[in-house]
Amino acid sequence: MTTHRHIAALVLSAAAIAACGTTAQTDITAPAPSAKVLFFNEGLNSPGVNLFADSTKLTAISSSSGAQTPVGTTYSQVAVGGYYTGLAAGQHTLSGRLSDTTAANRNIVISSVSTTLADGKWYSYYQAGPYDATAKKVDAFVVEDPIAATIDYSVANVRLVNAIYNANPGTLTVTNADTSIHPTPPPSVIGGSIAYKSAGAYVAIPAGSYSLSVAGLGATPVIHAAVALTGGRYYTITARGDMTVVSNKLTTYPTLDNQANR
């Protein structure tokens, strides 16, 4: 694979430069940002937010007029369509700030994590836990996405991230959903038991369609119907929601999301 998911951010930057006019001289000799960050909003009842690195806005949603909308990245969504955003390696304070454009709420920090980003590495920033509407705060954490430089197209790589604040550590199991295979392959356990704010290691499995189940989070497993896992890709299965919610008609019902990191 020669195209990476963070290239879109570079294309958008190029478009912004072009929009400034044809007579300006732009310095393109500086090295491209060498660390990459993906942003998830799993904060229960969290309003829409934009991701910042220090004082620099990394994500936003624009309207048809080109102006920023107050929508931002809402609960259960990943920013920038699931693409990574480039950042210079080094120490940064990453934060989720309200995308509400009213004067009272504009850019208020509701989550933040101070972290060091290494050259050439990939990371995910998660808002998680319940949103406190009075204090305007929600929990957050950062995990590394250890994506190998060499890609094996014969396997898909899968891991679990636990973003459920009131869950026990959970273990991901994937079961091949292709009923035409005989004998049916046995289920595969993906890594060990993963606690809240933690990520498991990527585990290589044959590409195919798999049903997902995470046991241990609560009294019953959290499940997801069959998803296609493509060879050469890296996937994060995120457990999100509130373990006390029992109705699957509510948005905070415990569930599993599937995101392709690469």
Image (tube, rainbow, N blue to C red):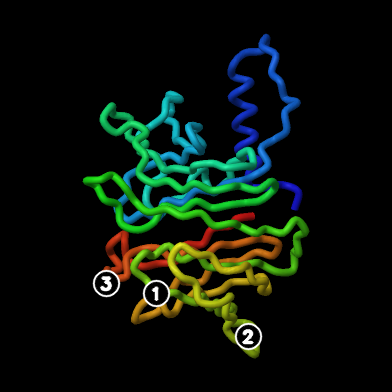
- Label 2 sits on a secondary structure element that is loop
Which residue in the protein does label 3 denote?
A: 246
**Which residue bears the numbered disc 1?**
168
Q: Residue at x 54, y 53 (%)?
A: 124
Q: Is 194 placed left or right of 235 in the picture?
A: left
Name the residue type under label 1. Asn
Q: Quadrant of residue 71?
A: top left
**Mark 3 or mark 2, which has the lower sequence index?**
2
Residue at image position (51%, 75%) is: 172
The residue that mark 2 highlights is 185
Q: Position of residue 114 (x, y in %)?
A: 49, 46
Q: Residue at x 56, y 68 (%)?
A: 200
* Sooner in the amino-acid sequence: mark 3 or mark 1: 1
Residue 247, percent from left and from top: 26, 69
Pinpoint residue 133: horizontal percent, then vertical percent. 24, 47
Q: With respect to residue 18, does 186 lie above or below?
A: below
Dot 2 surroundings within 10 Å: few (below 14), some, or many (20 or more)?
few
Label 2 amino acid?
Pro
